């Protein structure tokens, strides 16, 4: 068909009008992918436990009042012992513990329902034991320690302790392991723990029966701590039986 005829011209104008009337193709925005929040996810559970513990009141040691309950606790160091300068806590708001531990119910109370009638003083007693350990050494002072504690349903105590240790990575749960130890007993000759190497005198002053082998010095322990503090992983240990 001759494109110069009036009919062809009208067709061109019609096609052009239709083309100009079509709206531009809409750009559909991409859908943002959002991650679902799972409150039972390991990391979320751990974060929740840390927040809960760090929101508890701050108590100086030794504790002034007995209380009932088992659960978890954190100790914070505020003193001037030089090796602990990197982990020293602000007394007004301690958040980096030097040690995290637990106190579980004993005997039948492990399976008991919650309630003051079924609870002993496990947490209080455990913290008193720690005060005796600290008081037994010359390079620490009890008054330089603060604590926070959290009474926990017995079923969750071990898991909450693990969450706290893995998140906060306290040095006494890591490179300077041994703070929570008890006397191994007569006839035993274990190597001195790294905690007892850094803080001598506890076995003798608490009349431990074991013959602790002094194979490590304060200087050895300080070097181990310095290396651990600069490590990107800061490995920790969770003792199920302490």
Image (cartoon, rainbow, N blue to C red):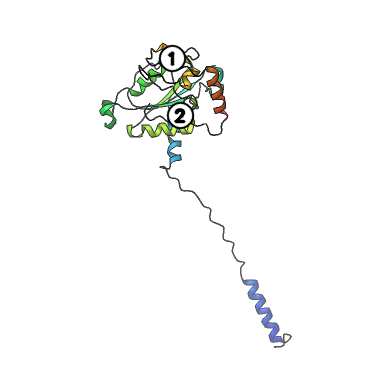
Please give the count of numbered marks on the rendered protein: 2
The residue pinned by badge 1 equals: 202
In the rendered image, residue 90, in percent from the top left (x then y), is placed at 53, 22
Q: CA distance from mark 1 to mark 2?
A: 29 Å
- Residue 87 place in picture, x, y as percent: 53, 24
Residue occupying the point 45% across, 15% down: 142
Quarter where residue 232 is shown: top right
Residue 204 drawn above or below residue 157:
above
Q: What is the quadrant of residue 154 in the picture?
A: top left
- Residue at 41% x, 31% y is 161
Residue 55 appears left or right of 70: right
Horizontal side, residue 2 vs residue 200: left or right? right
Q: Quadrant of the C terminus?
A: top left
Q: Nearer the viewer, mark 1 or mark 2?
A: 1
**Crowdedness of circle 2 by 10 Å Cα count: few (<14), some, many (20+)?**
many
Q: Please, is residue 84 above or below residue 17 in the view?
A: above
* Crowd rating for badge 1 (residues with CA inside 10 Å; few <14, some 14–19, many 20+): many
Residue 189: x percent and y percent?
A: 41, 19
Task: Tell me if residue 26 comes above or below residue 62 in the rendering.
Answer: below
Q: On the rendered image, what quadrant is the N terminus found in?
A: bottom right
Question: Which residue occupies the foreground of this view, 165 or 153?
Answer: 165
* Name of the residue lying farthest toward the right: 4
Front in this rendered view, residue 8 or 51: 51
Q: Position of residue 187 (x, y in %)?
A: 36, 17
Which residue, given by chain and number where applicable, does mark 2 sit on? 54
Secondary structure, mark 1, is helix
Identify the secondary structure beneath mark 2: helix
Q: Would residue 108 be found to the left or right of residue 207 on screen?
A: left
Q: Nearer the viewer, residue 125 or 225?
A: 225
Q: Of marks 1 and 2, which one's residue comes earlier in the chain?
A: 2
């Amino acid at each position: 068909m001759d494109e110069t005829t009036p009919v062809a011209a009208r067709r061109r104008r019609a096609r052009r009008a239709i083309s100009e009337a079509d709206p531009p193709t809409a750009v559909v925005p991409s859908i943002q992918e959002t991650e679902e929040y799972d409150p039972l996810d390991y990391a979320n559970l751990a974060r929740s436990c840390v927040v809960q513990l760090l929101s508890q009141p701050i108590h100086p040691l030794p504790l002034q009042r007995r209380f009932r309950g088992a659960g978890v606790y954190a100790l914070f160091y505020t003193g001037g012992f030089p090796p602990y300068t990197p982990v020293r806590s602000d007394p007004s708001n301690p958040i980096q513990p030097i040690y995290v531990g637990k106190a579980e119910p004993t005997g039948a109370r492990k399976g008991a329902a919650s309630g003051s009638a079924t609870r002993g003083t496990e947490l209080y007693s455990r913290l008193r034991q720690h005060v005796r350990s600290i008081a037994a050494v010359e390079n620490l002072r009890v008054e330089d320690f603060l604590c926070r504690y959290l009474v926990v349903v017995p079923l969750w105590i071990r898991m909450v302790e693990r969450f706290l240790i893995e998140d906060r990575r306290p040095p006494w749960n890591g490179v300077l392991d041994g703070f929570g130890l008890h006397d191994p007993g007569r006839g035993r000759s274990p190597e001195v723990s790294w905690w007892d190497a850094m803080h001598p005198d506890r076995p003798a002053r608490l009349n431990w029966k074991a013959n602790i082998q002094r194979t490590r010095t304060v200087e050895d322990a300080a070097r181990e701590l310095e290396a651990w503090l600069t490590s990107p992983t800061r490995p920790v240990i969770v003792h199920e039986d302490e």
